[in-house]
Image (tube, rainbow, N blue to C red):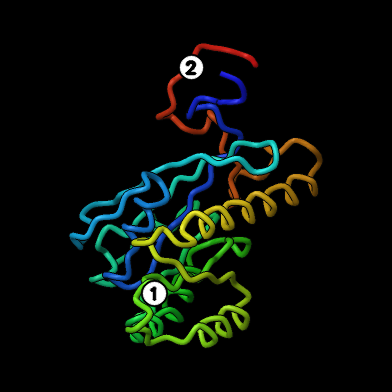
């Protein structure tokens, strides 16, 4: 089996939330990253949905638990439970619909009101494949991201452009934040205060993970 590790075998578990107006492509970004799928049928997400995928950062396996807004954003009713424990966020707008970019500021304010200061945020301009319909200039979004001190990337879930890159960058940056925090308190990451939003997930923290009953190496 070589270096392959089973999905349950990970070093860190990070919760990442997807936020932004309805119809900007959050669900397709999620399915592209976790399953490499894209659906032409645009249907609203119903019920809280999340998907997971593990990536390697340095020599660690980082498992992402990525939450989708479940259509709640239509009713401006995203609950604090949705944000709880999130250490990363992708704030998504549609490059062809200026109103979705205008609402980014409100989303950012809500996100920051519900999460830890150390949360890693990436602004994502999705549907970048629709070049002829572009309504939000790249430079405008870039300037906003610089001003707010957040990351920025344009993506296309349809063409699979930068989707992998956006999620991987967020997870890598979270890992660096967590590593720095761990260093501040000595070399035992699990010694982080339990009340902190940056929670180092290990297998013991996740009740859904069954004991693999095996193996070292």
Q: Measuring from the top left, give residue 153's x and y in whole percent.
A: 52, 70
Residue nearest the observer in this picture, 185 or 66: 66
Q: Position of residue 13 (x, y in %)?
A: 54, 41
Q: Is residue 43 left or right of residue 19?
A: left
Indicate whether 83 appears above or below 214.
below
Q: Local crowd at mark 2 within 10 Å, few (<14), some, or many (≥20)?
A: few
* Residue under the image location 47 percent in, 32 percent down: 206
Picture coordinates of residue 83, whole percent (x, y): 43, 58
Residue 18 percent across, percent down from the top left: 41, 61
Quadrant location of the N terminus in the rendered image? top right
Of residue 1 and residue 212, the one placed in the foreground of this image is 1
Q: Secondary structure at mark 1?
A: strand
Residue at coordinates 61% horizontally, 25% vertically from top-left?
3
Disc 1 + disc 2, Cβ < 8 Å: no
Q: Earlier in the sequence, mark 1 or mark 2?
A: 1
- Please tell me in which quadrant of the rendered image residue 12 appears: top right
* Quadrant location of the C terminus in the rendered image: top right
Please give the count of numbered marks on the rendered protein.
2
Of labels 1 and 2, the one closer to you: 1
Residue at disc 2, secondary structure: loop
- Look at the picture and state if 67 lies above or below 95: above
> Where is mark 2, residue-wise?
212
Checking the image for residue 93, the label placed there is: 1
In screen coordinates, is 116 left or right of 100? right
Name the side, left or right, on which 145 lies relative to 71.
Answer: right
The residues bearing labels 1 and 2 have C-alpha atoms spaced at a distance of 40 Å
Label 1 Cα crowd, 10 Å radius (few <14 / some 14-19 / many 20+): many
């Amino acid at each position: 089996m070589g270096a392959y590790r089973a999905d349950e075998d990970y070093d860190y578990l990070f919760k990442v939330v997807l936020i932004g107006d309805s119809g900007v492509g959050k669900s397709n970004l999620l399915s592209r990253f976790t399953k490499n799928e894209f659906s032409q049928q645009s249907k609203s997400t119903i019920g809280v949905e999340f998907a997971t995928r593990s990536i390697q950062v340095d020599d660690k396996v980082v498992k992402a638990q990525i939450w989708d807004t479940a259509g709640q954003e239509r009713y401006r009713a995203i609950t604090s439970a949705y944000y709880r424990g999130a250490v990363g966020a992708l704030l998504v707008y549609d490059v062809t619909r200026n109103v979705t970019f205008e609402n980014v500021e409100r989303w950012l304010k809500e996100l920051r009101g519900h999460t830890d200061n150390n949360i890693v945020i990436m602004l994502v301009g999705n549907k970048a494949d629709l070049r002829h319909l572009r309504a939000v200039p790249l430079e405008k979004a870039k300037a906003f991201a610089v001003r707010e001190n957040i990351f920025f990337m344009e993506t296309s879930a349809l063409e699979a452009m930068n989707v992998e890159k956006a999620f991987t960058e967020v997870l890598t940056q979270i890992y660096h934040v967590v590593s720095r925090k761990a260093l501040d308190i000595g070399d035992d990451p699990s010694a982080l205060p339990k009340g902190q939003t940056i929670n180092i997930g290990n297998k013991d923290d996740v009740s859904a993970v069954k004991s693999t009953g095996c193996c070292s190496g």
